[in-house]
Structure formats: structure tokens, C-alpha cells
Amino acid sequence: MKQTFLVALGAIAAISLVVVGFTYDEASKEELRLSADLQYRTRLLADSLIESVEPSFINNSTTTLERLIDRFTDRERVVGLAVFDNKAALVVGSEGLQDEVTRELDVVQTALDSDTPTGEFLTIATSSLYVLAQPLHQGQTIVGAFVAIQDASYINAQTIVIWRTNILRLLVQIIVFAAAVIALLWFVIFRPLRRMTETVKTARAGRAVSLPHPSSPGTFFAPLASEISKMTTSLVHARSAASEEARLRLEKLDTPWTAERLKEFTKAYLKDRPIFVVSNREPYIHTKTKNVIRYSVPPSGVITALSATLEACGGVWLAHGSGNADKETADSEGKLEVPPDDPKYTLKRIWLTAKEIAGYYVGFANEALWPLSIMAHTRPVFNKEHWLDYRRVNGKFAHALLNEIKEISQPIILVQDYHFALLPQMIKNSRPDAQVGFFWHIPWPSAEAFSVCPWRKELLEGMLGADVVGFNTQQFCNNFIDTVGREMESQIDYERFTITREGHQSSIKAFPISVAFSNMAPEGEREVTPSAIFGELGIKTEFVGLGVDRLDYAKGILERFKGIEFFLADNPTYHGRFTFLQIAAPSRESIPRYREHAAAVIAEAERVNKLFGTKTWQPIVFEHRTYSHEELQPLYKSADFCLITSLHDGMNLVAKEFVAARSDNGGVLILSQFAGAARDMGSALIINPYSAEETANAITKALTMPGAEQKKRMKRLRGSVRDYNIYRWAAEFIKAVASQG
Ligand code: ADQ
């Protein structure tokens, strides 16, 4: 639309310039014509009167002069007539001829001096006048002057009329022209372009398209439309071929899972029943800075995994709308289609008050449940008010979700993480036909550790409302079953891993979460050179180690830096030749424990840098910001090793992202034994992050590992991530949920 206005504006400016030019010309000519006409008529009047005035003036017959002047003063535009003596002093003048007029008449003196009739246009007071002074003679001698004064204001009035009429015409032209330009651009350019864009978008999203005939004649864009139509046809064919292939592969479970295969699987398995996902964090956050709205993808394992799932099978994702431009970018129900550049599913944002965020999210979820589940020696804080807010917000999400599913029978609902432990039961109570899966992304602690929670029974009851309760590892499932056995009356089947309570059965299963392997290392992508990638960050060393984390105390970044310190102390030959690049995304900054931790990490990096650094080399480069997945890719591909030192982690997707990015089978993964990922990634160098010596030794081993061994280990790691990627995780979880009840 902006372009339409610009085009119309340009054309209007051009037309206006032409009209103004012509009007100026017309008005000037008219002014000239009317002035000449007035001068001519005044001269005629003066000539006709002078024959009578001259004898009366010579005879000193003032009364005759006055009579004569009065008789002619009434004429149409005559303002006044006057007779002056040869010293330019007024002898007789029309009644009402103001003094200021007669005083201003220099023209009389000029006529007397030059002995020729002299005329002049004057503006006296506010009146526009034409004054003609004609000398009076007695014989050869100049005895005085006769003056005729005419009103000239109609000349101005006439030019104003010309301007007004033309400007009015111009306005009408502008309106008609602008409407015509806008309509033309709309019908000839924008509408066909929009249709073409829609067709391509629809085809790209894999929905049915009605394709224009490639040779539909006559339109402005016919040649382009024809090409697009052919391309879209090819895309539709390619897509249906891929879909057919994926459908055939459904039966062969040993082939890798892809987005297409998951899509076909959910279509066949759920028979078009939609999927609803609930999580606290939203997949796209819109923020406004200086009137510019941008979106970002938050750094979160849940988002990484679930985005890939919903992009493949579509559905509705309910999450807290936390961006300052979230309301502006959603409709009145808080909904929008995402990903913003290539919509594939619906995001429904839920609005929370500042008090709800403080109690439910900061307080109960992150100051109580997170440290309760993660064994990293931070004490959980239990506060009644926070608990009540947590319950209230779970109720708010339940209400919104129940509203979304009211028309749908047997909806599939996938509730994510420790923010919504009460939600499964709330949904089941109102909608027993809904099939509910609940996935706890972080570790589940031992029964003893969990027993300190004052609201443990309510939390367990809430979770057991789900048909399937999923964890990242079997160990967490076992801990959960032990906890339920200790805390409440229920029937536990240790063979089938089910818990039955009040007639409802929940299956407790491990689904090791993963990444979209195929998206991480697209074939035929541009090769990256490590020196160029790291050079942009000022890193020039031969060896580079990489850490990528949310800035969370559970990720063991302080312990990691200690390990680096030990490595550098033991290996002076690496001074100036090795850099550790830590990418740390700000996380949960409203919580004091996180702010303290961030400050401690920064201080620790500075301490190590001071200890070993030189003018030209810093051993730790600390990037305190969120990188996009596209920015992380070349770093993963170029690092000599990736170091993961989680003190306790449900899975750790960074480990899998690093492996998935290494299509060259190079690089070494150093992985904490306390990350869920360590279960399936035995070919990594497994360490205890609490031991700085172990970490230092692993770094030495990684930097000196022969290429052949690197390849052998990386191939095995890649095989496991390729085989158990996010699409398989989603398919297995969805299948487990949909087959219950
Ligand atoms: P997280 O604790 O968020 O996830 P993780 O699994 O490592 O941890 O996932 C982090 C995600 O955020 C990754 O996709 C990573 O690329 C991204 N990320 C991290 N740091 C980043 C940075 N600086 N810039 C940009 N992106 C960054 C929780 C559990 C995990 C579990 C996941 C999934 O704590 O144990 O693996 O859920 O279940």
C-alpha cells in the first residue's frame, strides 16, 4: 500500500507542478490584458474631459470645474477626478477623494515635468488604483494637470478567481487521478501479485492449491504467472511424491524419521484430530524497540523440540505471551499464525498479570520446582502465595484450553514441563475424552528429595491426570514411580510402568528428547572456515573450545571455567594457542539467584583471563547474548570440541545440536555424566563436572585426539541422534498418548 501511495504522490506532484505553471501563465496574461484595457479606458476618459476642463481652468471657473468633475465621478470605476495647478497643488477634486490619495500622487509632478500624460498603478491604503495625470496647457505653457483615478482592484480579483478556479480543478483532478492510479495499481499489479504470492505460499505449506492455467492470457504478469504456475505445479508434485514415500516408509521403522514422515504418521494415526500443545515459554516473542517490531526465538530446549514437532504436524500452541509487542501482533483472541515468515500452526498467547508471573513463574516454578528437581545445591523456596498463583495460572491455562477444544472430540493435548503439573488433572476433570500427555523436561529427583515439597500430593495428583507422563530418561521414570509409591495410595505395575489411581491409569515412559537432525546439517550447504567464523569474534588461536548454554547455575559454567583453568595451568604449551568461546544466553534475570550467578560467571571468566591472558590473547571469550540457531550452526561446525558440564540436566539439546551439525564427522563432544544425554551418547568423553581435573584431562584428550578416532566417535554419536531425532520423539509420544484410554 505504501508503494501505491508513493506512486500516486509522485504523479500528483507532477500534475500539480504543470497546473501551477499554466495557471501562473494564464493569470499573468489576464492581468496584463486587464491593465492595458484600464489604461486605455482611462486615457479615453481623460481625453474626452480635458477639452472641457482646460478652458474652465484657464478662466479660473472653479464652479464649472467642480460641476464637471462631480458629473463624471459617478461613472462605473472612476474613484475620483482632480485638477492640480502647475505646482502640483490640488485645485479641485471629486468629493470624497481622500487627502492621502491626493498627497501620494507623485505622478502629477512627473506629468508636469515631462509634459506628457503619465499613468501609474498604485496601492494606497488598501485600495488598488490606476492614476493618469495629463498636463493642461494655455498655449504652449503648462498650467496644471488633470488627474483621473480609476479603481484597479477588479484586476487582482480577476486573477484570484483564475487561481481559485484552477486550484479547485486541480483538486478534483488529484482525487480522480489518485483513485484511478490506486485502482489501476491494485487491479493490475497488487491483486495479481498477492494472488501469486498466496498460491506459492499455499503450495509451500503443502495445502491444496488451485493453479491458474499457465497460459491464461492477457494479464500484465502473464509471463511471470506462467513460470510461477509451472514451479508451483512441480512443488505440488514433489511434495506428493515425498508424502507418498514417507507413507510407504511408515511401515519400515528402521528408516530415519523426517518432518514429512511425522506429518504422514499423525495424519494416518490421529485421523485429522488436531494437536494442542501447552507450554509456559512461547516459540516466538514479539518485541518493540523504537517503534520497530521484531520477533525472536527464545533459547529453550522445550521450544527447540516442540517447534520442530508442530511445524511438521500443525496444531495449536498455547503459551504465555511475554513480549512487549505480543498483543499488537496477535488478534483479539491472542492468536497468530507462526512461524511468522512461513505459517504452519497457530500460536495462542495467554496474558498473565505481573503478580501471576511473579508467583507462578518466578516464585513457584523457578524458585521451588526447578531447584527441587535439579540437584545443583540450590535450596528450593516454598511460599504459599506463590503456590496459590501457580494453581491459579494452571487454572487460567486450563480454561483457555477447554475453550479451544470445546467443539473437538477426543483432542490430543501435550502439556509441557514443570510449569503445568496441575493442568492434566484439570483438563481430564472437565473433558474425560481428551487424551492428555504430560512431558517433564527436567530431571525427576529421588523420592526423598521430592518429599520436602509441602504440596507434593497436589502436584502428583495433577500429573497423574495425564494418560501418559513422559520423562527424558528411564531413571527419572523410576524416581517418579518411587515418589508416587511413597506419597500416595495407588496401584503400581512395575512391569508395564503404569500407575492406576481412582480408576484412571497413567503410563510412565521415557522418551529421550532430541533435535531435528535433518535441519541441522542441510546437504549442499556452504562450507565454513573456522578462522573466518571465529575471526569475527576476535579469536585467532589454532584451537577453539565451545560452550552454549542458558546462563543457568544448573549448566555448571563456573565448574567449566575451573576445568579450563586447570587445563591451562597443566598445559602451558597451549597458552596463546587455545581459546574457549562461551555463548551464554541471558535467562530468568528477574530471579536474584540467577543475577548473582551471572555476575559470578562473568567475574570467573575475568579471573581466568587475568591469570593467563596476555595483551594479544584472552583464554575465555564470553558472549553474553542469545544467538539464533542459524548463528550457532557455523560455531558448532568449526569448534574443536563442545564442552557440556551440566550439574544436572534432563537431556541437554546442545550436545545433540553439536553432533547434528558435524556433517564432517569431526570435533569432540565432552559431556557431563549428569546430563540425560549421557545415557545415549557414550561415544562422547564423559566427565564428572565437579572434578576440574577430569574436565582438564578431557580437554587435553579432545585437543590431541587423532582424526580417525574423532571420526569414529562422531559417526556413532551422529548415528544415535539421526536415529532418535525429534520427529521420532514426537511420533512415539503422540502414539503413546493417542493409544491410551
Ligand atoms: P534447557 O534447560 O533450556 O531445556 P537444553 O536442552 O540444553 O536446555 O536446550 C537449550 C536450547 O536453547 C538449545 O536448543 C540451544 O541451542 C538453545 N540455547 C542455549 N544457549 C543459547 C544461546 N546462548 N543462544 C541461543 N540459543 C541457545 C530443558 C531441560 C533440558 C532438556 C530440554 C528439552 O533443562 O535438560 O534437554 O528442556 O527437554
Image (cartoon, helix red, strand yellow):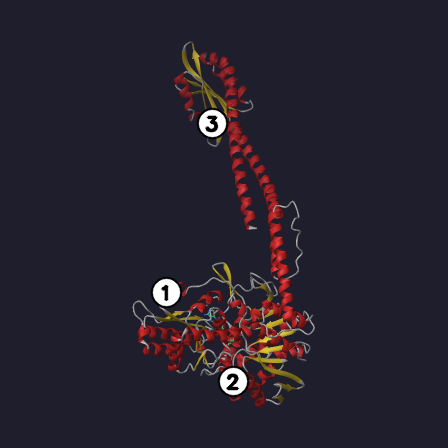
Query: Does residue 731 appear in the picture of this structure?
Result: yes
Q: CA distance from mark 1 to mark 3?
A: 89 Å
Comparing 628 with 40, the one in front is 628
> In the image as oriented, which residue stretches furthest toward the top?
139
Residue 445 appears at what percent x and percent y? 51, 84
Total marks shown come to 3
Q: Residue at x 40, y 17 (%)?
A: 114
The residue identified by callout 3 is 98
Secondary structure state at the residue bearing disc 2: loop
Q: Earlier in the sequence, mark 1 or mark 2?
A: 2
Identified by mark 3, the residue type is Gln
Q: Quadrant of the C terminus?
A: bottom right
Comparing 56 with 271, the one in front is 271
Query: Residue 643 vs residue 31: left or right?
Result: left
Q: Which mark is residue 445?
A: 2
Q: Residue at x 31, y 74 (%)?
A: 573
Cβ of disc 3 within 8 Å of ligand 1?
A: no
Query: Does residue 398 appear in the picture of this structure?
Result: no
Residue 64 appears at what percent x and percent y? 50, 15
Secondary structure state at the residue bearing disc 3: loop
Query: Are discs 1 and 3 less than 8 Å apart at CB?
Result: no
Comparing 517 with 331, the one in front is 517
Q: Which mark is residue 538?
A: 1
Identified by mark 2, the residue type is Pro
Quadrant of the rendered image containing residue 203:
bottom right
Cβ of disc 1 within 8 Å of ligand 1?
A: no
Q: Nearer the viewer, mark 1 or mark 2?
A: 1
In the displayed structure, 137 sits above or below 562; it is above
